[in-house]
Amino acid sequence: MSKITDKVWALAEPVAKENGCEVWDVEYVKEAGQNYLRVYIDREEGVDLSQCEAVSRALDPILEEVDPIPDSYIFEVSSAGAERALKRPGDFQRFIGSLVEVRLYKSKFDSKVHIGRLLAYDDGAVEVDSKGEPLRFEKNEVAGVRLRME
């Protein structure tokens, strides 16, 4: 994570907890010439618009006061989503047995995209069961991993 996202995560975490949620991810990206700060939240029973709004309203003045980003940006709070990206070791451990999509930088086993049940995560390496066959992808091969809807 960048220093900006680390700072925002630290500011957002207590706000999310006060609203019965957890921070899933924070991203600071440039899209179509605009900077976006996005805080993704989650909770076991799912997130709806009211939780996103509550976290946004509580976090916005904190961000204004602390001012962790010198440039102008658009601030958004949203649900992590059903097909969220898995990034941290805890994300992978939480979703062992779930259906995932693994995207690779280069083709392996005749494809750059593999869908299967997450079997294991080991220091960046991902193992999935794809059509009854275990496939292992090393950290340097994996471009990204997302949950897939059943």
Image: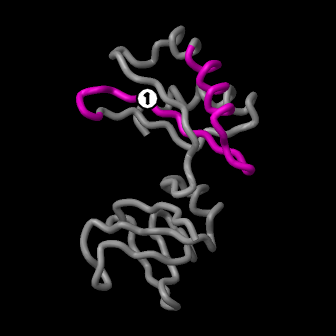
> Can you tell which quarter of the image residue 65 is in?
top right
Span colored in magenta: 31-60
Left or right of residue 71: residue 11: right
> Can you tell which quarter of the image residue 138 is in?
bottom left
Question: Residue 68 in the image: x percent, y percent?
Answer: 45, 18
> SS at mark 1?
strand
Question: Residue 117 in the image: x percent, y percent?
Answer: 55, 76
Question: Badge 1: how crowded within 10 Å, few (<14), some, or many (20+)?
Answer: many
Q: Quadrant of the C terminus?
A: bottom right
Left or right of residue 150: residue 106: left
User: Number of labelled discs?
Assistant: 1
Q: Quadrant of the N terminus?
A: top left
Placement of 143 over or under 51, stated as above or below? below
Left or right of residue 8: residue 44: right
Left or right of residue 33: residue 79: right
Residue 45 is covered by the magenta coloring: yes
Question: Residue 25 in the image: x percent, y percent?
Answer: 53, 42
**Mark 1: amino acid:** Leu
Residue 91 is covered by the magenta coloring: no
Q: Residue at x 76, y 36 (%)?
A: 20
